[in-house]
């Protein structure tokens, strides 16, 4: 049986996630979260230690939701050829394009961080981004076996960026003037195109 305190905690998280996605960290007040969650401020302090702790928990959930798919399947891709593994990595990076609701809120929160980065977000990345970036580094290392660690990290960031520019700007790219189709077949086609370009680029770099 779910305890009342756990229900309250989740209600606060749900309300905060929606508000942070709509307004960003700076534009979201504790008062607004309290009103939307139908709790008092003491509940936020009790469960999260304040606004920063609550925001960190929302960011943690968002980051986990957007990366766990890659981390779960990382070992399976090691048995594939490097080209197949890269294609699979890119497909999994693009899958949020076909999602709605919760993942859309996660992406909007990260878009706010692009415009107005917070200390909470920077600290979270420094602590939790390593496993995900490790997957990307291991992948590019298969194309650049002689490269030093700095080059591998730069290449991994570049690889992730080829997908994130589409994922993080999904709403804008789907409307005018671009009008990019984002149905399942279009996303599959986009994945193949990005994979082709990335493989060619890494082969030339090698």
Image (cartoon, helix red, strand yellow):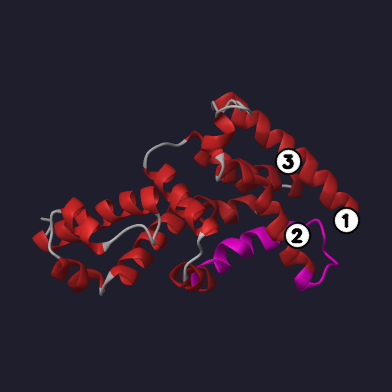
| Nearest the eye: 179 or 142 | 179
Q: Which labelled disc corresponds to residue 195? A: 3
Image location of residue 110, percent across then percent down: 49, 54
Q: Quick one: label 2, few (<14), some, or many (20+) residues within 10 Å? A: many
Q: Earlier in the sequence, mark 3 or mark 1?
A: 3
| Nearest the eye: 183 or 49 | 49
Q: Is 123 left, or right, of 179 in this rendering?
A: left
Residue 106: say if magenta: no
Q: Earlier in the sequence, mark 1 or mark 2?
A: 2
Furthest residue to the front?
Answer: 27
Q: Is 42 left, or right, of 24 in this rendering?
A: left
Mark 3 residue element: helix
Task: State the residue at coordinates (18%, 59%).
Answer: 34
Q: Which labelled disc corresponds to residue 155? A: 2
Task: State the residue at coordinates (69%, 62%).
Answer: 137
In the image, the segment drawn in magenta is 127-150
The reply to whether dot 3 and dot 1 touch (C-beta < 8 Å) is: no
In space, the residues marked 2 and 3 are separated at their CA atoms by 14 Å
Quadrant in which residue 148 is drawn: bottom right
* Quarter of the picture holding the N terminus: bottom left
Q: Which labelled disc corresponds to residue 205? A: 1
Q: Which labelled disc corresponds to residue 117? A: none
The reply to whether dot 2 and dot 3 touch (C-beta < 8 Å) is: no
In space, the residues marked 1 and 2 are separated at their CA atoms by 10 Å
Image location of residue 89, percent across then percent down: 63, 47
The reply to whether dot 1 and dot 2 touch (C-beta < 8 Å) is: yes
Q: Is 106 left, or right, of 157 in this rendering?
A: left
In space, the residues marked 3 and 1 are separated at their CA atoms by 15 Å
Mark 1 residue element: helix
Image location of residue 91, percent across then percent down: 61, 40
Instruction: Look at the image and tell me whether residue 79 can be seen.
Output: no
Q: Quick one: label 3, few (<14), some, or many (20+) residues within 10 Å? A: many
């Amino acid at each position: 049986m779910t305890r009342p305190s756990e229900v309250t905690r989740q209600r606060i998280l749900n309300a905060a996630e929606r508000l942070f996605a709509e307004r960003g960290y700076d534009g979201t007040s504790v008062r607004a979260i309290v009103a939307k969650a139908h709790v008092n401020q003491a509940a936020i302090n009790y469960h999260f230690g304040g606004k920063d702790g609550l925001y960190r928990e929302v960011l943690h959930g968002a980051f986990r939701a957007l990366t766990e798919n890659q981390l779960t399947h990382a070992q399976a891709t090691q048995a594939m050829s490097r080209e197949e593994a890269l294609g699979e990595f890119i497909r999994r990076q693009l899958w949020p394009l076909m999602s709605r609701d919760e993942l859309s809120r996660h992406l909007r929160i990260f878009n706010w961080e692009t415009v107005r980065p917070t200390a909470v977000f920077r600290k979270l990345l420094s602590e939790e981004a390593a496993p995900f970036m490790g997957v990307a580094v291991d992948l590019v290392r298969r194309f650049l076996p002689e490269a030093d660690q700095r080059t591998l990290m730069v290449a991994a960031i570049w690889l992730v960026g080829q997908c994130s520019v589409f994922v993080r700007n999904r709403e804008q790219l789907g409307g005018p003037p671009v009008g990019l189709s984002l149905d399942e077949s279009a996303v599959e086609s986009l994945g193949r195109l990005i994979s082709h370009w990335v493989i060619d680029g890494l082969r030339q770099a090698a």
